[in-house]
Amino acid sequence: MIPQRLTSPARRAPEAERSDGIVYVVLPDRTSFETVDATPDRTAIATATRQLEAIRDEWLAPLVAQISEQAETLGRLTAERDQAQHERDELRRRAHRANTQQEISILEREQIVAEREALRAARDTLEQRVRELETQQAESRTQASSAAQTAIHDATIVHFVAA
């Protein structure tokens, strides 16, 4: 059985003529119903198949190859980018660590300088205190010597008076 379909005047299939690879379409009159043969033409199928194969071979195959090549390039570039980012992050960590150690060294140096200054100040205070104590000791000796001389002198006077 040959497939057929009914068309209305508004949807009637146009008639076509082929000449030198060009299709000429004759529009139907829109006044009557008629049956249109829906059986495909074998030469038309073969021509369409060849055209699709040509499209596949001439356009699609190179396009697929180009897309594959670009996907490989993109994958390689992505891997290189990821590696570069990893190296950058590692360098940042090292630089931060070095800066932190440098800051610690600076802080340690500042602490050492501050401790040195505190020790110098304590030494100066202690030296001042030693000088004050030596001065007091000298004054005490002077006073003791003076008191002893006064006591000797008084004892001599008492001794003369008592005799």
Image: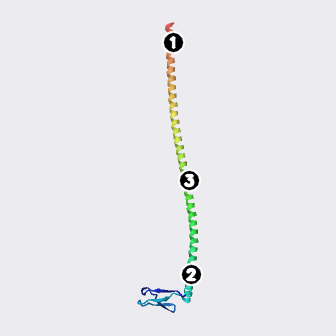
Instruction: Give amino acid for label 1.
Output: Thr
The front one of 59 and 97 is 59
Q: Secondary structure at mark 2?
A: helix
- Image height check: is 17 above or below 86? below
Q: Which residue is mark 2?
A: 56
Q: Position of residue 58 (x, y in %)?
A: 56, 82
Instruction: Give amino acid for label 2.
Output: Arg
Neighbour tally class for label 1: few under 14, some 14-19, many 20 plus, Cα within 10 Å: few
Neighbour tally class for label 2: few under 14, some 14-19, many 20 plus, Cα within 10 Å: some
**Residue closest to the far left:** 31
Residue 156, label in figure: 1
The residue shown at (51%, 39%) is 118
- Image height check: is 60 above or below 116? below
The residue shown at (50%, 18%) is 147
The front one of 86 and 65 is 65
The residue shown at (54%, 54%) is 96
The front one of 118 and 151 is 118
Q: In the rendered image, which quarter contains the N terminus?
A: bottom right
Q: Position of residue 6 (x, y in %)?
A: 47, 86
Q: Position of residue 89 (x, y in %)?
A: 55, 59
Q: Which residue is mark 3?
A: 97
Instruction: Give amino acid for label 3.
Output: Arg
First in sequence: mark 1 vs mark 3: 3
Q: Quadrant of residue 92?
A: bottom right
Horizontal relation, residue 94 to residue 31: left or right: right
In this rendering, the label closer to the viewer, 1 or 2: 2
Cα separation between marks 3 and 2: 59 Å
- Image height check: is 151 above or below 51? above
Residue 108, label in figure: none
In this rendering, the label closer to the viewer, 1 or 3: 3
First in sequence: mark 1 vs mark 2: 2
**Residue closest to the far bottom:** 19
